[in-house]
Amino acid sequence: MAQPVQQQYLQKRCSAEQAAAVIQSGDTVFMGEFAQNVEAVDAALALRKSQLKDVILVTTTRAKPLKCVEADPQRESFIWNDWHFSGLGRKNGELGLASYIPLCYHQGPQNVELYEEPNVAVVQVAPMDANGFFNFSTSCSMTPSYCRKAKKVIVEVNPNHPRCLGGLDESIHISKVSMVVEGPNSPLLQLPAAQGSEADRRIAGHVMALLEDGSTIQLGIGALPNIVGEMIAQSELKDLGVHTEMLADSYVDMYEAGRITGQRKSIDRGKMVYTFAMGSQKLYDFLDNNPVAAIFPASYTNDPAVIGRNPKVVAINNAIEIDLFTQVASESAGPRQISGTGGQLDFIMGAYKSEGGKGLICINSTFKKKDGTIGSRIVPTLSAGTIVTCPRSVVHYIVTEYGVAQMKAKSTWQRAEALIAIAHPDFRDQLIKDAEALGVWRRSNKSV
C-alpha cells in the first residue's frame, strides 16, 4: 500500500546541501527554465566546486546568475549549456562561460527524451497539493521531459510560484520525486515592460491591419509585441484566441479588455494556450489556479501541425537582419549568439498551415551604430557568420515601419523588389545596386 503523500514528503525533505551532495563529476544536471530559477541547490552546489569536475548544467533561458558559474570562471567544474540565451546567457557566452544549444523549439522535449541522459533534474515548483502533486508553475516547455528522463528529481519548493493549470504534464507527483528542498522563497522574476519607439508603433499599426475578428494570436517578446497587445486591448476586435509559446502581461490586458474569448478556435476552445510565462506580478496572479489559461509542453504548443489546426493564426515575431534573398536572422549578429531560434520557425510554419493564417517577421528598417549614424537592417547578404533562423523558403510576411511585403510565390527578383520597397528610403538606391550585383534585380523592376 502506498504511503500517505505527507509522509512521503517528510521522508524526502532534506537540506540544499544534502541534495547537492548527490551530484557527481561528469553528471548532466537540468537546472530549470525561464522564471523557475533554482537557487538553494545552485548555491550549495557552487560550494562543492573543488570536489567536482565537468558537471554539465542545462537550462532554458536562465534569468538569474548561476552561483556555480560565478564560482568557476575557468569552467573546469561546471559547464553551462543553455537552450535559449537571455541577456544573462548572452553576456556569459561572450565570456566563454555559456554555450548555446541549437533548437527548433517544438522538438525540445523529443531531443531530451531521445538524446539526453540527465543524471539529475533540479526544478523549482509550487507547494505540494493535497493529492501529492507539485505544480511546475510558469514553465512547462521541457521540464516534464527532463523529470521523466532524469535518474533523480530534486524539487525546490517556492510558495510564491502560481499554480498554473494544464493542459498537459503541468505537475509531478511526490512518488516520482527523489528529494524535496524547501528553498529561500524568493519572489518570481519581474520582467519589466520594454519601451517601444515610434518605428515600433508604426510597425504595430501595420500588424493591426492584418488582424481580424477570430484571429488566433502569438506574440513574441519585446517592445513591439507589447505595443501590439496594447493596441489590441484598445481596439474593437472580437473573439481573439491565444495559442503561443510565451504568455506575457499584454495577454492579461487583452483578456481583461474583452478582446480574448477563444470561442472561434478549433482546438482548446476558450483556453489561452502557452508553454511558459514571464512578466510582472499581475501576470502571475492572473495565472494562479485560473482555468482560462492552459500550460502545455513545447512539443504541443509549438508543433506546426497543432498550431495550424486553429483558424486565422497570426504569429508576430522579431528579427535582427534580413537579406535581399529574404533570409531572416533573428538570433545572432555574425557568429555572436544573441538569443536562439526559439519558436519563431515553428510559428511561421504553423501559421502558414492555418486557414487564413499569417506568419509575420517584424523588423525596424534601421539601427543606430556606435558612432551615432544609422545602418540598414535590410542588407544585400547577411553578415559573415550570421545564423539563418528562418530560411527564405518558409518566409511569409515581412513588416517594417514602411509597410508589409508578402513573399510566398515570388521569385528572387520579386522578393528583392518587395523588400526594398519597405526598406528605409535612404538605403533603397544602394540596395537596388546591390540587388543588381547579386543578380536578383530586373531592368524592368519598378523604381522604389
Image (cartoon, rainbow, N blue to C red):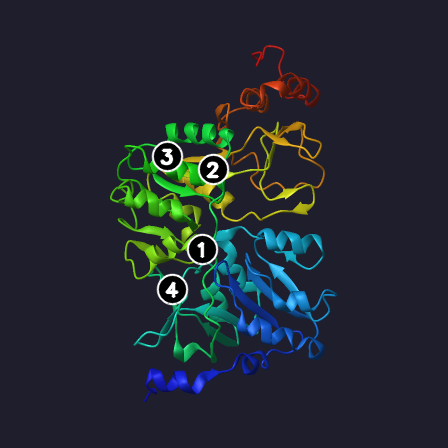
Residue kind at label 1, given as amino acid type: Ala
Of residues 163 and 114, which is closer to you in this image? 163
The 10 Å Cα crowd at callout 4, few under 14, some 14 to 19, many 20 or more, is: many
Q: Which callout, 1 or 3, points to the residue nearer the camera?
A: 3
Residue placed under numbered mark 3 in the picture: 231
The disc placed on residue 170 is: 4
Q: Residue at x 63, y 11 (%)?
A: 443
Whether residue 352 is visible, yes or no, is: no
Residue sitting at x 39%, y 85%? 8
Amino acid type at circle 3 is Met
Q: Amino acid at mark 4?
A: Glu
Determine which of the numbered discs, if any, sits on residue 224 in the image.
Answer: 2
Residue 240 locus on image (x, y percent): 30, 40
Give the Cα separation between the discs numbered 1 and 2: 23 Å
Task: Specify which label sits upstream in the sequence, 2 or 4.
Answer: 4
Disc 1 and disc 3 in contact, CB within 8 angstroms: no
Indicate which label's residue lies in the foreground, 3 or 4. 3
Q: Marks 1 and 3, Cα distance to the nearest angstrom? A: 28 Å
Answer with the quarter of the image where residue 284 lies: bottom left
Q: Secondary structure at mark 1?
A: helix
**Label whose residue precedes the other's in the sequence (1 or 4):** 4
For the point 72% across and 64% down, which residue is it?
73
**C-alpha gap between disc 2 and disc 4:** 29 Å
